[in-house]
Image: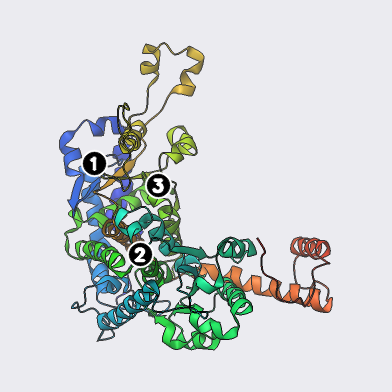
Amino acid sequence: MASPALISRTHPWEDLKAHVEDLKGTHLRDLMGDADRCRSMMVEFDGILLDYSRQRATVDTVDKLLKLAEAASLKEKIHHMFHGERINTTENRSVLHVALRAPRDAVISSDGKNVVPDVWDVLDKIKDFSERVRSGAWVGATGKALKDVIAIGIGGSFLGPLFVHTALQTDPEASEHCRGRQLRFLANVDPIDVARNITGLCPETTLVVVVSKTFTTAETMLNARTLREWISSALGPDAVSKHMVAVSTNLPLVEKFGIDPKNAFAFWDWVGGRYSVCSAVGVLPLSLQYGFSIVENFLKGAYSIDQHFYSTSLEKNIPVLLGLLSVWNVSFLGYPARAILPYSQALEKFAPHIQQVSMESNGKGVSIDGEPLPYEAGEIDFGEPGTNGQHSFYQLIHQGRVIPCDFIGVVKSQQPVYLKGEIVNNHDELMSNFFAQPDALAYGKTSEQLRKENVSQNLLPHKTFTGNRPSLSILLPALTAYNIGQLLSIYEHRVAVQGFIWGINSFDQWGVELGKSLATQVRKQLHASRVKREPIEGFNYSTTTLLTKYLEATSDVPADPPSILPKI
Ligand SMILES: O=P(O)(O)OC[C@H]1O[C@H](O)[C@H](O)[C@@H](O)[C@@H]1O
């Protein structure tokens, strides 16, 4: 692949920089008054409506962004991704999470090999295994059915599956399929998370799924050894083969850990951890909980957006538009953060998942060729469901810093409630806020309006809202497994678009390594100090002081204790 020049050295970038000045005197109040403009800023696909009319952008801005996409060879980069080119150059890997949700007869190749049959071999194995567990054909060491699942994993091996599980929990069809079953996630190496996970569960009826792409992640492996102890201390070491299975790309290490390779579910190095929810990472635990057919609908929803992303022209392409507008907000308008605000409690874990997808992908300081970036890439993502967030951090968004917001609404509630005598039903009440907040941000409230309401002079500055704060709205028809898949795929591709424009590698994550290696040094020191009473060496004054305090205050901790598990 030819090495691309920095995008900031292209004419469309310069042009957009200059264009910011054109918009300086334009308020969103004015832009929203132009119905033709607003009409042109709405896109519909497969039941989803994107309205980006509340972006601080004109039709001209969008044209200029599309020219930027051209200068960044966006179409070609999308093409390279879908065709298995090794676009993750620092790890020499292709990026093919789209293959995970392709139909059985699709052809998607990596290194000349169609990977779709391998994907479906694993999906078929998951279907078979999950049906045996769910039906009680697969039983634990004492002959009891396994009704509860603890999935151990962290980062990409946790956040995506947790988001989808949380979203499915209240879907009527999915919840029908999981009666009497529980799915829990053990992520943090904090022993409190172990305690929370095993509380109320019995090893006899629990299946543990160890999820780790590398099967070397310190937190996951310690948690896996901890739950292996929980099972074998209750049921004997032979029980492990009946109660523990694994999802990994590293099958030799799975076997070395003591999990029967027959009970290992593979994926491949062309699936990035944070893009792995559609692999066995998500599909196995979710199928155990909800049944494979529900999860298959989730994959179909993601596939629908994949096709849209691949084949729709850029100006009508939802992930492309979202990605370009984020670049506009970050790189040109200078807004470093983005709030993800789903008006659905079922999407409670969506922002934390996208936080990893986005910040681990695009939080980079150099171009894909290693050149320091003369502009900032990535953005600070955070979010909470509405209306909860309104009573928490929205104050800052309304009157403090400008933070572009994604409002995500759902037309049909998973769990409608109607109360006799109320003027609207409960979902309408929620959605009233979804519709109102974007206008409050865009229009604000002037001192003239306040004066007409007889607001006293001294309160005028406090009650004034400057407005002109950008947002966009995404309206989903419902929140079925299919829609959840669509939403996931939209955001995954949006993040890729941003990275493609910024000219970075969105698919590596070297930035997480340094902290890990320093933790190794501390771990060795803690061991040496506890077991051999060795002095603290090789750390700066600050860390030495903190470690000394910690070790002194825990001098009663036994150096070589027997296994002790939480007892709550
Ligand atoms: O799936 P694993 O290999 O256990 O990795 C778990 C996570 O840890 C790493 O440090 C990365 O930051 C994540 O991208 C990854 O998802």
Q: Is residue 300 above or below residue 401?
A: below
**In front: 433, or 201?**
201
Q: Is residue 473 left or right of residue 289?
A: left
Which residue is drawn at the image coordinates 80% and 66% (left, top)? 551
**In front: 273, or 147?**
147
Q: How far is mark 1 from mark 3, CA to CA?
A: 33 Å
User: Residue 58 shows which numbered tag?
Assistant: 1
Residue 139 placed where, x, y %?
45, 78
Per the image, label 1 sits on a secondary structure element best described as loop
Residue annotated with mark 3: 345
Quarter of the picture holding the C terminus: bottom right
Q: Colour mode?
A: rainbow
Q: Amino acid at mark 3?
A: Gln
Q: How far is mark 2 from mark 1, CA to CA?
A: 45 Å
Per the image, label 2 sits on a secondary structure element best described as helix
Q: Is residue 82 left or right of residue 554?
A: left
Per the image, label 3 sits on a secondary structure element best described as helix
* Dot 2 or dot 1, earlier in sequence: 1
**In front: 447, or 381?**
381
* Dot 3 or dot 2, earlier in sequence: 2
Residue 69 placed where, x, y %?
25, 59
Q: Is residue 460 left or right of residue 53?
A: right
Residue 131 placed where, x, y %?
34, 74
User: Residue 228 shows which numbered tag?
Assistant: none
Q: Amino acid at mark 2?
A: Tyr
Q: How far is mark 3 from mark 2, CA to CA?
A: 19 Å
Instruction: Count the marks.
Output: 3
- Whether residue 516 is visible to the viewer of this picture, yes or no, is yes
Q: Nearer the viewer, mark 2 or mark 1?
A: 2
Q: Amino acid at mark 1?
A: Thr
